[in-house]
Amino acid sequence: MIISPLLLVLAAAILGAVVLGYVFARAANRGLIGAVLGAGAGALGSLIFMIPLDYCMFEAERKTIDVIFGVMLIVLGVLLVVAPVAWVGQKLLRRESLISATSQPTQGTFRQWWLALPLLAPTLVILVLFLYYPSLETLRLSTMLSRLGARREAFVCLDNYTRLFEGTAYLDVVVRTLYMSFFIVVLSMALGLLIATMAYLPVRGASIYRILLVWPYAISPAVAGIIFLLMFNPAGGIINYFLNNWFGVRPGWLNDPSLAPWTIIIASVWKSIGFNILFYIAALQNVPVDLIEAGAIDGAGLLRRFWHIVWPLLSPTTFFLLITNLTYAFFDTFATIDYLTPGGGPLQSTTTMMYQVIRLGVDNNDLGKAAAQSVVLFLMVIGLTVLSFRTGGRQVTYGA
Amino acid sequence: MKKLVFLTVLLALVLTMAVPPSTIKAQEPVDIEVWIAFSDYRLDWTKEVAEAFNAMFPQYHVEIVGGMSYEEMFAQVSVAAEQGALPGVIHFNEASTQDARDSGNFKPIAEALAGRTEINGLPVNFDDIIEPTTAYYTHNGEWTSFPWNTSSAIWFSNMNFLNAAGFDTPPATWEEVDQYCEAIMALDNAPEYCWTFPNYGWFFEQWLAHQNALFVNNDNGRSDRATEVAFDGEAGIAIFEWLDDQYDKGYLYYSGAQGGDSWGTVDQAYQTQQVAMAAYSSSDTTLYTRMGEENGFTTVASFMPYNQETGWTGSLIGGGSLWLVDGLDPEVEEGALTFMVYLSQPENDMAWHKLTGYIAIRKSSNEMLEEEGWFAENPNQTVAMQQLAQSTVTPATSGALVGGFPAIRNAITAATDRLFLTDEDPAALLAQAAAEANTIIEEYNLLNAP
């Protein structure tokens, strides 16, 4: 189906006009100005993604899913331009300062404002070279059929993305990633907290225990992976040797599709638990002892004291650990998976999104598809982080 | 005062550094950088050879850079090519041959040698190189890369178990493997499993070559560019059905590991005597023989068992070769070629074989090893060479030439994984792998065909 680009720009303009007109009307009854501004912003916004892609997804031989993606990209572009304009416009119309009142510095203003740029330049250069430019290049590659070492590339529009929706293969990978990450995060944090509370008790040699508990975190994932591989090898590994001698069972740690993810979860939790323990011990040290004593005097039992006094005071740490563990579970478990279950596990049962990206890009030399999947992974992690901030962030209590 | 002293010293240092280097050295040796895809004792040996070479030819200075796997090497080379920062010589595995030829980064050895039979006093003597290696790395009779490490897939048997079950020699056919396993698994001290192999596409290709079946079309990509796969025919299905049968009977151990990193689990299973036999690469013959000696059993190497229905045509080689980068300075190119020829000279060839188990690629080397009684003392080391020597060279046994080979191998590995762990029909699984592989070839040719 062919849809004229002009029609799409017009539709985007109307969308922008409606949104901005409504916002401006609500703010200060200036709906008309809002509509005109919105039309311009909307039209411009729709072009952000469409100009580089040249409306390729609306060509004749494209399928419905391509059109849907195209429409989504246009809407995204419109929002990207209209949202800041709406925010700024709202502030101006309400005669509010653009800079938040509480962030006005009262003393020590940096006088030579122009000095800021050269001072920031080194960091900016590094960020641009190693973060922003590769990100843009990834976006570009995700629209290409590209192989490492090939003579040329071929433009394939959004095929690398739409192909992910054919069949359930990619959905399986996503679900598997979420399910494994959930358990890694929850188990690692829960066990970390449990062990931290125990390690915090005034026992003899507590500091030695703490060092030993944090040790696994310092081991490189590759080393941990090899150790676990040799331990968990269903035939010849030491774990199955003892299990067979004592109980007569030989679980297929690495070759049973339902057990392999759990082997990865166990190995990942073992590796990251030290990090959680460290932070929780530090956080526990900030819990005032008199509060707990007061609770004990009032007759609160151990669990009640923990749940009502200690846990809320730990909430900032818990929130921070949630975000870092989420990042670890999504990205850093690659090495563990690659060493324990090379190839992605029996029946691909340990292939997470990150593993799939590297397998496609590095092993199969298929850069285009890997780039597309890496963009999807990026969006998912951003989404989860934003979600965490919105739900968990509200429940965090800062300050004792 | 202190400032003055400091400045004077600084000035003096700067002046000494400004002394022109030509007054220090009489002649600069030509620098040749060689990238090797090894990171273990094989890399150490190569560095020693480079030192000996530098001593022999002071006009050249070869520097060995290693520490990468074959896949990492490929990625590194692609990136370096874009930046124009390629070294002089690159070590690729055999599967990357088509990719390397298409990349445009390399100059065919035959072209660089231009018919010379010796270089810097070293004889080239390509006729001395064994047949299967010649068949693999030549294109229309011309050498494109220089052969170096050649291996073949062979069979290792723990003779303790075989002897206990009443057998003196390792199994030769699939049928015999089945018989042997039945007897071995019935022993009192039977191992956990009868045999295993790394789930890596190369073994499937070997069993295909035994049956004189092609892996890809157009004579395995040698008469013309390969456009689709041919491994999903009868021969391929026979392999899958046999493997499935062995797994269902509990004879075959599958560790769940797939691809290039799956070899470690096989090593461990064999060493701890959880399996009686293993299909493996001859490049670790020394290792497996020693595993036996150190753990109280004897390892006997033999030919890979073949399909008795179709007979045995020949075996495939594995390993890698050295590629000459295009566009080098004439002296650098000369030095690079000399080093490659030096590495393959009989003394080095024989030393390499003794150290690792890789096959000596020169017929003269093999004769000398025979004469000095090496093979008589180390019977396991002769198996791979015998297997290749007895192979009939056909398009099927010459090995496949196709782009995106690693990705295709991964498709077969995934299909083998599904074969063991699900009840799906072998033919259907192969067809699925074939469809995936065909897409890879199509995309590869789209981006690489001139």
Image (spheres, coloured by chain):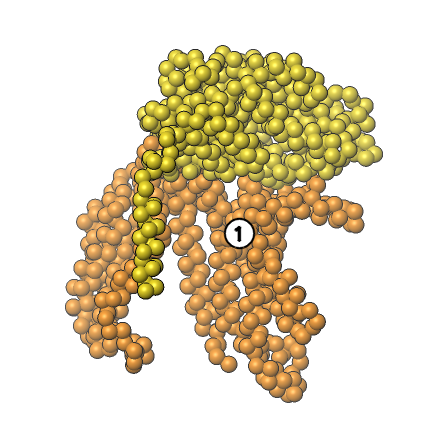
Chain colours: A orange, B yellow
Left or right, B22 with respect to A360, comes to left
Could you tell me residue A264's position as x and y percent? 59, 50
Question: For the N terminus of chain B, which image quadrant?
Answer: bottom left
**Between A194 and B351, the one nearer to me in the picture:** B351
Residue B438 lies in what quarter of the image? Answer: top left
How many residues crowd mark 1 within 10 Å: few (<14), some (14–19), many (20+)? Answer: many
Q: Residue at 60% of width from left, 62% of height from top?
A: A214
Q: Identity of the amino acid at label 1? A: Thr
Question: For the C terminus of chain B, which image quadrant?
Answer: top left
Could you tell me residue A331's position as x and y percent? 48, 53
**Between A129 and A51, the one nearer to me in the picture:** A129
Q: Mark 1 points at which residue?
A: A333
**Residue B346 showing in the rendered view:** yes
Left or right, A394 with respect to A295, comes to left
Q: Residue at 45% of width from left, 73% of height from top?
A: A394
Count of residue discs: 1
Helix or strand or loop: what does disc 1 sit on?
loop
Could you tell me residue B36's position as x and y percent? 48, 33
Q: Residue at 46% of width from left, 65% of height from top?
A: A388
Q: In this view, does B302 lie above or below B393?
A: below
* Mark 1 chain: A
**Residue B323 showing in the rendered view:** no
Left or right, B338 with respect to B41, comes to left
Q: Residue at 55% of width from left, 34% of height from top?
A: B44
Could you tell me residue A143's position as x and y percent? 33, 43
Residue A116 lies in what quarter of the image? Answer: bottom left
